[in-house]
Image (tube, helix red, strand yellow):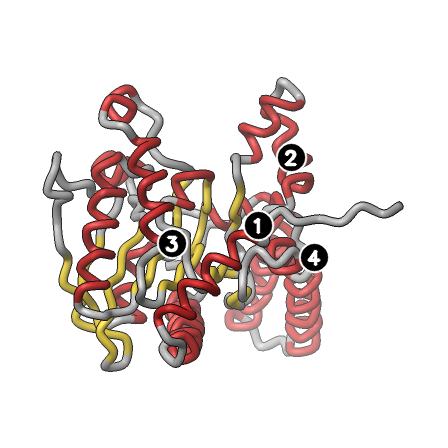
Amino acid sequence: MKADPLEFEKPIVNLERQLADLKDRAADSDIDMGPEVKKIEEKLAKTKLDIYRNLSAWNRVQIARHQQRPFMLDYVREAFDDFTELHGDRHYGDDEAMPGGLAYLEGRRVVIMGHQKGRDTKENLRRNFGSAHPEGYRKALRLMKLAEKFKAPIVTLIDTPGAYPGIGAEERNIAEAIAFNLKEMMLLDVPIISVVIGEGGSGGALGIGVSDRVLMMENSYYSVISPEGCAAILWKDRKHAEEAATALRLSADDLYDMGIIDEVISEPLGGAHHDPIGAANALKNSVRSHLLELEKIEPEKLLDLRYEKFRQFGEFKEKV
């Protein structure tokens, strides 16, 4: 399926259309259009590199939200084996915005969970647009405790605009559910790896993001607030979302430079939705590499390193 273009990709679309028209004309006539075709192909390749190597923070937010981008269960299907989904939080119900269960990564048993969005309106309603309820976070913690019991590593895939802020979620204590996860994840004595695969919005992302390694796909974002939310607060108008995205420094490269995340996972040119299989392989290789490192660390040392990792966030020095 050909990916739907974003606004900043229109120059690429125009050149692709020109190239297709030129090839059709060449096929319907005896005229040699090889030189013209080659010229357009070279221009197209250069335009792609110029655009995709100079993406703004807002461009990356747009890619992270692309409807054809691989979602959590797409990565599970392509990068992991024998996934068995487990349901329910044993308190209230099951949250389909936060699927999770048992899987294998090249023969290694892992417990995996994450946010799942929908491809169409019906599935988005079922998945609540990737915004989990309290029972989603409680289910995630139940599975993490199961992983700790059986000494299995934990992998979380983050892709949410934020936890669900509705009345029902507040009545069932969404804030407490996330806060409890933060505390308990800091104490789990098995390796934890989190990967931001799309949107990493606020506490909804952090509720399954307290990890020994935090990785980000190249065109994902991780932020305390959405660009639109930030713009509405600071500028009183959501039209300033592009400025807010730059100010928030929410891109993978910015967060890596600040030491917030541990690796930026490269995506196929143009984004993961242009080559989902390639993106899944990149995620698989990165997670495997970090698991091999973490499994060599003794549990007590692992907990100390995890604690120090998060204690260092926000440290700064003032110049005199």
- Kind of residue indicated by mark 1: Arg
Residue type (three-letter) at the residue carrying disc 2: Ala
What residue appears at the point 45 percent right and 61 percent down from the top-left corner?
Answer: 306
Identify the residue at the far right of this view: 320
Q: Earlier in the sequence, mark 3 or mark 2?
A: 3
Q: Position of residue 83 (x, y in %)?
A: 18, 66
Residue 63 location (% of width, % of height): 51, 50
The C terminus appears in which quarter of the rendering? top right
Earlier sequence position, callout 1 versus callout 3 = 1
Q: CA distance from mark 2 to mark 4?
A: 18 Å
Q: Secondary structure at mark 2?
A: helix
Task: Measure the alpha-carbon separation of dots 3 and 4.
Answer: 37 Å
Q: Amino acid at mark 4?
A: Asn
Residue placed most toward the observer, 231 or 55: 231
Q: Which residue is mark 2?
A: 244
Q: Is residue 307 left or right of residue 88?
A: right
Quarter that holds the N terminus: bottom left
**Residue denoted by label 4:** 54
Graded by Cα atoms within 10 Å as few (under 14), some (14 to 19) or many (20 or more), the crowding at tag 1 reads many
